[in-house]
Image: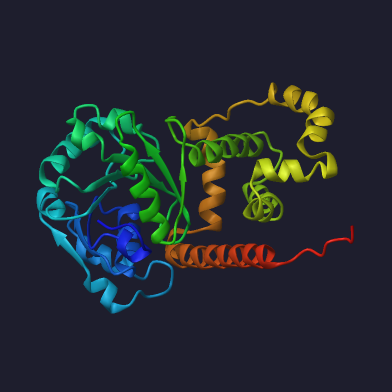
């Protein structure tokens, strides 16, 4: 495969194994980029689920894109002759190990094998695979839904070959994503670990009566959300220090931060403890309005991403006047 141009980087045929929310969103993204997609999943409503996925954010993908998606009766049929496999099945290690054994046996020897697992290490998934298959297997973990959010965490295993990593980085970039190579394996990867840390504190604060769920969400969307959409937490912390940057911030705030971190506790996730939070969220976002709410969410997220990208492009093209020497 020639990787010299974006169009050459993209595969002509791909298989999606697992048609939950993630797998169907991947299918839409690939088909929107002109890739023929075969999906394997035992769910009885597979065709209807695919149709819904192509209108999931309130917009409709072109009919030509939907026509590129077909279904397969089994995994072996789905992966036959493809250039790319995206596994998006249940989060159980034995299941994924057995599944990738079947995928590796039936897919072409040059196919890139990826999993969208949200936390299982690729080394563990590839444990029983022959070396040639393990060399092509890596994690490509998106943020949900992948046809909307840019991030794809690329996580190689111990036996993943460098050319497979390079190929994955180029492929997902050509799909319009922002692939980030993670330097070492860690359970949960990076984005989910950051999200988990915030959720842990969010549940605890609401359970302790410091805020309602709605107020806590509003605090984030009115502060950390827009700030972190422009710069991540570390860059924001550095910029918050003014000319002294992160050195100044750590000198003045570091001891207090450590003292506060030592007081942080975990919330109680027992059913009776989380019941009030669940009740508030279900009242605010009732089930019968779920489709409309998620469509509005996705449209808003796309607008935020477009604004972020537009701002970044504008900043990069701005020439800063230089003072005379």
Q: Quadrant of residue 226?
A: bottom right
Q: In this view of the protein, which residue sits in the foreground, 127 or 59?
A: 127
Q: In this view of the protein, which residue sits in the foreground, 58 or 283?
A: 58
Name which residue lies at 71% across and 39% down: 210
Q: Is 202 above or below relative to 69?
A: above
Name which residue lies at 34% across and 45% down: 116
Q: Quadrant of residue 120?
A: top left
Name which residue lies at 26% across and 77% down: 64
Q: Give the percent coordinates (x, y) of residue 209.
A: 69, 37
Q: Quadrant of the C terminus?
A: bottom right
Q: In this view of the protein, which residue sits in the foreground, 85 or 294?
A: 85
Q: Is residue 325 shown left or right of residue 26?
A: right
Q: Is residue 295 shown left or right of residue 227?
A: left
How many numbered callouts?
0
Q: Give the percent coordinates (x, y) of residue 29.
A: 35, 63
Q: Give the percent coordinates (x, y) of residue 314.
A: 66, 68
Q: Give the percent coordinates (x, y) of residue 237.
A: 73, 41
What colouring does the structure picture have? rainbow
Q: Is residue 299 shown left or right of residue 69?
A: right
Q: Is 47 above or below relative to 141?
A: below
Q: Quadrant of the N terminus?
A: bottom left
Outermost residue on the bottom side: it is 63
Outermost residue on the front side: it is 325
């Amino acid at each position: 495969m020639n990787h010299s141009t974006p169009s050459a980087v993209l595969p002509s045929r791909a298989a999606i194994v697992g048609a939950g929310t993630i797998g169907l969103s991947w299918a839409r993204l690939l088909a929107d980029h002109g890739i023929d997609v075969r999906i394997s999943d035992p769910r009885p409503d597979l065709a209807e689920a695919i149709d819904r996925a192509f209108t999931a954010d309130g917009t409709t993908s072109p009919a030509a894109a939907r026509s590129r998606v077909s279904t397969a009766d089994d995994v072996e049929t789905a992966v036959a002759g493809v250039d790319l496999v995206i596994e998006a099945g249940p989060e159980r290690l034995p299941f994924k190990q057995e599944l990738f054994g079947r995928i590796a046996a039936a897919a072409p020897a040059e196919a890139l094998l990826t999993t969208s697992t949200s936390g299982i290490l690729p080394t563990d998934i590839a444990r029983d695979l022959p070396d040639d298959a393990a060399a092509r297997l890596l994690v490509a973990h998106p943020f949900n839904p992948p046809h909307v959010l840019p991030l794809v965490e690329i996580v190689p295993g111990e036996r993943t070959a460098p050319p497979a990593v390079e190929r994955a980085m180029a492929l997902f970039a050509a799909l319009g994503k922002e692939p980030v190579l993670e330097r070492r394996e860690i359970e949960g990867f990076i984005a989910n670990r950051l999200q988990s840390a915030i959720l842990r504190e969010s549940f605890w604060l609401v359970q302790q009566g410091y805020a309602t769920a709605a107020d806590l969400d509003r605090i984030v969307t009115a502060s950390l959300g827009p700030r972190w959409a422009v710069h991540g937490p570390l860059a924001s912390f550095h910029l918050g220090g003014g000319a002294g940057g992160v050195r100044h911030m750590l000198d003045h705030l570091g001891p207090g931060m450590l003292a506060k971190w030592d007081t942080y506790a975990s919330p109680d996730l027992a059913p009776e403890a989380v019941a009030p939070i669940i009740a508030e969220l279900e009242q605010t976002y009732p089930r019968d309005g779920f489709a409309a709410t998620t469509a509005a969410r996705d449209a808003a997220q796309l607008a935020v991403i477009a604004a972020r990208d537009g701002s970044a492009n504008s900043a990069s093209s701005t020439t800063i006047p230089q003072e005379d020497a």
